[in-house]
Image (cartoon, helix red, strand yellow):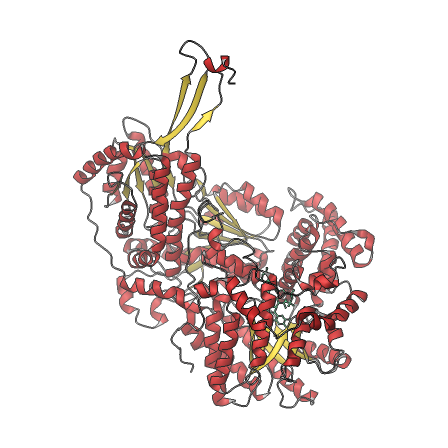
């Protein structure tokens, strides 16, 4: 029904020189506002509004007052926010008590101010008392008296949060909301509404269908309501309307899933557009995260084409544009172009943008070359005004809707509107916010105002509420400053039209304090959601070729060991800074060759594109990190001692280090081991996995090109039992670094122990039965996102992958149903395609082992669900299917933790329910004997920290996924059956590759202590 257009860049990449330079963009925006705005004059309107609000502050529960009393930077504000986010969804009393005690116990509400403050103060006091009884050790103690007392506090807290929430939803369902709207309209004639059906984005098809039904129901109700209002007839600007989120209508609203977006999401949106158009109401698509920005324009274009065909008269279709995007001005132009192209008029809601913190974090995590959003609040304000001006200039095809609570911004818009020769427009505010200012603004009856009105039950409100609290609690926020009398009116309304300032904080590349020459540059990533950025990668994948790597014979190995032993002598005396420079050079070279290495990783290791980019970045990080670490940690140290003596500690290479790495990270783990051994002054015999020699060979070649002598590093390819075993038992081996299975690590350990001669170190990093504990305060959507990523990314072929999900019985049914739904949305297939989420497992042997495990689970456990197999995804995947070995991700419910006895290295998730004592769950996980990664999902901070302390586990991740450890941020490696340590990518790693030597010189040997006698002490 909707044809998929070619993915062609409509916008510049936020990382091109043009878009990257925030200062340059700002200057252009300022230039575009020249002569358009007399700020001081515009502010004459805003002053009385501000004064009036200050003279008659909004009631306590209004956002403004609440945030002034309890700023989110305070323990109290944070406690309220955390409780608001979680408490109402907790199903069991014990956990609700623990959460309330945990959060209120951290805060101190002031009782002196009376009213609701008094209530919070007494709640807080009770909570503190309660927390003493219940937390931290006795969290589950349940004497009757204590339970009754605690429950009272919890009930009161729940009530308080419900009250708070009620301020921001217009009704629990559309009918109730429309009733409220009617009442509000009586008090304020001409007010319009845009209803928003609250909820998290869809994770499953069932979620999406539920939202679709709820939107449809709302549209029908609004249409009827508009008819009854009577005064608006066929004018979309007068009618009430609806705001929709595309991520609610389709669980995979992502750039990588364009084909499904067009095939599945667009028909759904069309189902909403038809009745909306017939009823002449405004349907606005909310703006979401910037990784969907380009996609959203294609969606707009396709829908507009169809609207032009079927409802050419309709003037109610619209979308929100975020001014904080560096590319906002281009978005406005593109939207106007699309409207013109189809002969339509759009309603465009201009907002500043609600996901600023998330955008900054994503850019840092992905190592992007810049931020996609402005980094100074006043830059966003300028962009808003410049976009507003542009919208006015397109008033033939755009009806602008200015959504803001900022009095300065509103006054500036009204000022510009005057100059726009009566071009129609409206202002918008969120229900429960900005009421004071708008009360004043609306004294001018000619101004149209629409209220964005969330509709939903308490549970659905929480995420929305927290976003509003965060957004408005920020120091820079207008609402935050409005009723803070310490901020004088001049300052509050000061002009944002001042010159650009340098980025407010470190660029993603500077995350590790890189200053151009000193510090470590963060590895550069690729934003696969940006067409211009992913193109080179896709081309390189198509062109990738593997070279054959010859297997080493026993004679080759012996010769290599002899050569490496020779090579060691010259490499180890190469000055440390020179060795470090070689690593840094290698990092730069690898970074520059990212597409080529990604191509090779796809071809040889069948990794998906996202995984390839992360892997190359990790290898780059290892090179830079170990270079830096070596210079600091391995430098000669002078040690204290008595006079007449000097003491020095030297760290130096041990000899020939054997590095044996696995196929699942054929570049990153291989590189990490090899460069660590090299920079410590060892020569290296590198044995890559049998399955992935090409990637390893290419990296060895790169190191040699960058200055590692060819007799200090040799690649020896072949079977582990032959080549690996021979290298380990070779008398010339001075140390072994191994990553792989626990079983092979034990074989290596025994083999080393059985050797005659020197005892040498073994650094082993092995697998784990990694668990995630989820209590009933956790947000199911977040849990499912984290679990699905952790268990199934890389087809579960990560040491860190989640194997065992332990879910509290109170929320287990919902979480399990959501996992089932999320599984069926995953795409298994050709790793070279952008849309693939899960590629094949590495080879036939792995396939057989995992399949056998699945077969046994079918007999002993309860199937939760699985992802569609590649053949059902359609498209020419059948040949690929014959060549590669696909196992669609699958999940089973097992009865106990002890049922999971071994690590199965594939996309298989075991889920177990738990109740009662969470500490007992932790003990059972410890009892498995592995200790690599652990996930914790809870909003009870003290519980999370206590469990982390109890865990005999190397990497603990709280409220996030548990894969993708970052070099230098999350040093990686476990204990127990999971490995020996030290952690890779951590500050203690290099020591293990070194021999230590203390050199003590008796400086008084030649006749006496000259220094002491000369007074040099
Ligand atoms: C009716 C309505 C509908 C909305 N719909 C959407 C929507 O569809 N999508 C969406 O994303 N948002 C939406 N929002 C939220 C909106 O984006 C703003 O977050 C919110 O309105 C606050 O902006 P302000 O002008 O009211 O307040 P101000 O206090 O003037 O501005 C705050 C905003 O400035 C920006 N900002 C804060 N700090 C910085 C910084 N250091 N550097 C750069 N920028 C910064 C952020 O965007 C922040 O939200 C909507 C808001 C309203 C009123």
Can residue 976 be seen here?
Answer: no
Q: Nearer the viewer, residue 256 or 339?
A: 339
Horizontal and vertical percent for residue 271? 52, 82
Q: Give the number of marks.
A: 0
With respect to residue 539, does 151 lie above or below? above
Q: Quadrant of residue 826?
A: bottom left
Q: Is residue 735 above or below residue 312?
A: above
Q: Residue at x 33, y 61 (%)?
A: 886
Q: Quadrant of ligand 1?
A: bottom right
Q: Residue furthest left?
A: 555
In the picture, measured across the screen, residue 389 lies left or right of residue 659, that is right
From this viewpoint, which residue is outermost toward the front? 35
On the image, the x and y values in percent for residue 642 come to 49, 17
- 127 and 620: which one is in front? 620
Across and down, in percent, residue 659 comes to 31, 41
Residue appearing at x 33%, y 39% in the figure: 678
Residue drawn at (79%, 59%) of the image: 116
Asked if 756 appears above or below 327 in the picture, the reply is above
Question: In the picture provided, is 73 more to the left or to the right than 249?
Answer: right
């Amino acid at each position: 029904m909707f044809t998929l257009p070619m993915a062609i860049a409509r916008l510049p990449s936020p990382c091109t020189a043009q878009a990257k330079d925030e200062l340059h963009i700002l200057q252009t925006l300022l230039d575009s506002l020249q002569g358009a705005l007399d700020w001081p004059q515009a502010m004459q309107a805003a002053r009385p509004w501000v004064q009036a609000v200050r003279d008659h502050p909004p009631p306590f529960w209004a956002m403004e007052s609440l945030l002034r009393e309890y700023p989110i930077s305070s323990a109290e504000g944070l406690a309220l926010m955390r409780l608001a986010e979680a408490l109402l969804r907790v199903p069991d009393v014990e956990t609700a008590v623990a959460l309330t005690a945990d959060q209120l116990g951290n805060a101190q509400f002031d009782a002196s101010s009376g009213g609701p403050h008094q209530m919070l103060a007494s709640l807080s006091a009770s909570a503190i008392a309660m927390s003493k009884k219940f937390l931290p050790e006795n969290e589950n103690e349940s004497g009757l008296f204590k339970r009754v007392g605690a429950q009272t506090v919890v009930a009161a807290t729940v009530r308080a949060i419900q009250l708070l929430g009620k301020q921001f939803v217009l009704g629990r369902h559309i009918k109730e909301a429309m009733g409220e709207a009617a009442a509000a309209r009586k008090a304020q004639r001409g007010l319009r509404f845009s209803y928003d059906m609250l909820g998290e984005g869809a994770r499953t098809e069932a979620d999406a269908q539920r939202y679709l039904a709820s939107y449809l129901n709302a549209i029908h109700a609004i249409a009827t309501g508009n008819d009854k209002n009577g005064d608006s007839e066929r004018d979309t600007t007068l009618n009430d309307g609806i705001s929709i989120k595309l991520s609610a209508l389709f669980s995979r609203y992502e750039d990588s899933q364009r084909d499904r977006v067009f095939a599945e999401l667009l028909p759904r949106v069309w189902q909403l557009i038809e009745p909306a158009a017939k009823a002449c109401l405004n349907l606005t698509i909310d703006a979401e995260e910037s990784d969907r920005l380009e996609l959203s324009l294609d969606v707009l274009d396709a829908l507009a084409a169809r609207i032009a065909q079927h409802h050419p008269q309709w003037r109610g279709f619209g979308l929100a544009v975020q001014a904080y995007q560096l590319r906002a001005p281009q978005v406005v132009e593109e939207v106007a172009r699309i409207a013109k192209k189809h002969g339509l008029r759009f309603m465009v809601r201009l907002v500043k943008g609600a996901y600023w913190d998330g955008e900054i974090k994503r850019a840092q995590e992905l190592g992007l070359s810049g931020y996609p959003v402005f980094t100074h609040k006043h830059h966003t304000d300028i962009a808003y005004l410049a976009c507003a001006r542009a919208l006015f200039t397109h008033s033939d095809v755009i009806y602008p809707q200015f959504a803001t609570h900022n009095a300065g911004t509103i006054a500036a818009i009204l000022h510009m509107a005057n100059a726009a020769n009566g071009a129609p427009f409206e202002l918008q505010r969120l229900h429960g916010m900005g009421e004071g200012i708008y009360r004043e603004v609306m004294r001018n009856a000619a101004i149209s105002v629409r209220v964005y009105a969330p509709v939903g039950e308490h549970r659905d409100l929480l995420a929305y509420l927290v976003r509003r609290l965060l957004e408005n609690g920020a120091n820079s926020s207008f609402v935050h400053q409005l009723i803070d009398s310490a901020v004088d009116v001049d300052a509050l309304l000061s002009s944002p039209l001042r010159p650009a300032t340098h980025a407010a904080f470190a660029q993603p590349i500077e995350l590790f304090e890189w200053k151009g020459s000193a510090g470590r540059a963060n590895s550069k990533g690729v934003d696969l959601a940006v067409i211009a950025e992913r193109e080179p990668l896709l081309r390189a994948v198509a062109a990738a070729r593997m070279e054959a790597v010859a297997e080493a014979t026993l004679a080759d190995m012996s010769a290599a060991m002899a050569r490496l032993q020779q090579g060691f002598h010259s490499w180890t005396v190469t000055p440390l800074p020179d060795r470090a420079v070689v690593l840094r050079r290698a990092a730069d070279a690898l970074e520059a060759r990212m597409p080529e290495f990604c191509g090779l990783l796809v071809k040889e290791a069948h990794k998906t594109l996202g995984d390839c980019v992360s892997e190359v970045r990790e290898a780059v990080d290892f090179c830079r990190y170990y270079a830096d670490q070596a210079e600091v940690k391995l430098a000669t140290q002078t040690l204290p001692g008595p006079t007449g003596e000097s003491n020095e500690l030297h760290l130096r290479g041990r000899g020939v280090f054997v590095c044996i790495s696995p196929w699942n990270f054929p570049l990153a783990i291989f590189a990490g081991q090899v460069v660590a051994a090299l920079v410590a002054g060892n020569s290296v015999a590198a044995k890559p996995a049998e399955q992935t020699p090409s990637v390893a060979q290419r990296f060895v070649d790169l190191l040699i090109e960058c200055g590692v002598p060819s007799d200090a590093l040799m690649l020896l390819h072949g079977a582990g039992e032959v080549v690996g075993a021979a290298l380990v038992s070779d008398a010339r081996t001075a140390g072994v670094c191994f990553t792989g299975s626990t079983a092979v690590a034990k074989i290596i350990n025994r083999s080393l122990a059985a050797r005659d001669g020197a005892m040498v170190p073994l650094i082993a990093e092995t697998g784990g039965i990694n668990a995630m504990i989820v209590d009933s305060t956790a947000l199911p959507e977040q849990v499912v996102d984290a679990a699905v990523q952790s268990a199934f990314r890389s087809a579960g072929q990560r040491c860190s992958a989640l194997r065992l999900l332990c879910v509290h019985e109170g929320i287990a049914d919902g979480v399990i149903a959501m996992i089932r739904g999320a599984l069926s949305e995953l795409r298994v297939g050709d790793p070279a395609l952008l849309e693939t989420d899960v590629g094949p497992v590495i080879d036939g042997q792995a396939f057989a082992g995992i399949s056998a495990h699945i077969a046994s689970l079918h007999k002993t456990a309860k199937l939760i669900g699985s992802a569609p197999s590649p053949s059902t995804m359609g498209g020419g995947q059948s040949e690929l299917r014959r060549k590669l070995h696909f196992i669609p991700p699958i999940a089973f419910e097992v009865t106990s933790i002890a049922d999971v006895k071994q690590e199965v290295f594939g996309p298989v998730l075991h889920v177990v329910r738990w109740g009662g004592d969470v500490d007992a769950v932790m003990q059972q996980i410890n009892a498995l004997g592995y200790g690599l990664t652990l996930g914790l999902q809870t909003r009870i901070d003290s519980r999370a920290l206590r469990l982390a302390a109890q865990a005999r586990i190397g990497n603990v991740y709280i409220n996030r996924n548990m894969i993708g450890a970052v070099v230098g941020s999350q040093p990686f490696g476990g204990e127990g059956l999971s490995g020996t340590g030290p952690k890779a990518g951590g500050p203690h790693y290099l020591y293990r590759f070194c021999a230590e030597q203390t050199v003590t010189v008796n400086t008084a040997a030649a006749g006496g202590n000259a220094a002491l006698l000369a007074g040099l002490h």
